[in-house]
Amino acid sequence: MAKSQTPPARLTRRAEFLRLASGGKKIARHGFVLQAAKDGQAEVLRVGYTATKKIGNAVIRNRAKRRLREAARLLLAGRSLPGVELVLIARRETGEMEFSRLTQNLNKALDEVLA
C-alpha cells in the first residue's frame, strides 16, 4: 500500500527539543505527551519524536515512535501550520494501545494546542 501523504519535516537537534520543553505548551494524554511552540521564522511544520529508556528496550521504543510518526502523518497531512513545531514523547502504553484511540487522542491534543 503506497503512502498518500508526505510526512512533516523533522526536528533533529537536541537543542530544538530542549527549546520546546522549556518554552512550549505541554499537553499530556493517554499514550503520549505533546509539546508545541510557534516559531515565527520557520515556514513549515516540524515534528520531533522521542522515547526514553524508561518505557522499555530499543524494540519497544522504536515501535512507539513508529506509531507516533504514522499518527502524526495521518493527522497533520491536511493542516497548514507554518511555523509550528511539535514534539511527541512516547509513553509506556504507546506501543500497545489501540491505534484508533492513539489517533483520537492526538487529534484532540492538536486541536487544543493549536486553538
Image (cartoon, rainbow, N blue to C red):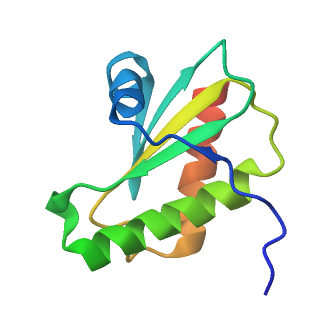
Tell me if residue 105 comes above or below residue 23 in the rendering: below
Residue found at the very far left of the displayed protein: 54
Left or right: residue 91 versus residue 11 is left
Tell me if residue 93 comes above or below residue 30 in the rendering: below
Residue found at the very far bottom of the displayed protein: 1
Q: Quadrant of the rendered structure where residue 41 is? A: top right
Left or right: residue 59 versus residue 43 is left
Closer to the camera in the image, 104 or 26: 26
Q: Residue at point 75% right, 31% down?
A: 81
Give the x, y percent position of residue 21.
34, 27
Residue found at the very far top of the displayed protein: 40
Give the x, y percent position of residue 98.
49, 76
Give the x, y percent position of residue 66.
49, 69
Left or right: residue 57 versus residue 110 is left
Q: Residue at point 35% right, 27% down?
A: 15
Residue found at the very far front of the displayed protein: 13
Count the labels in the image.
0
Q: Quadrant of the rendered structure where residue 95 is? A: bottom left
Q: Residue at point 45% right, 23% down?
A: 25
Q: Residue at point 41% right, 26% down?
A: 20
Give the x, y percent position of residue 61.
31, 68
Closer to the camera in the image, 100 or 24: 24
Quarter of the picture containing the N terminus is: bottom right
Quarter of the picture containing the C terminus is: top right
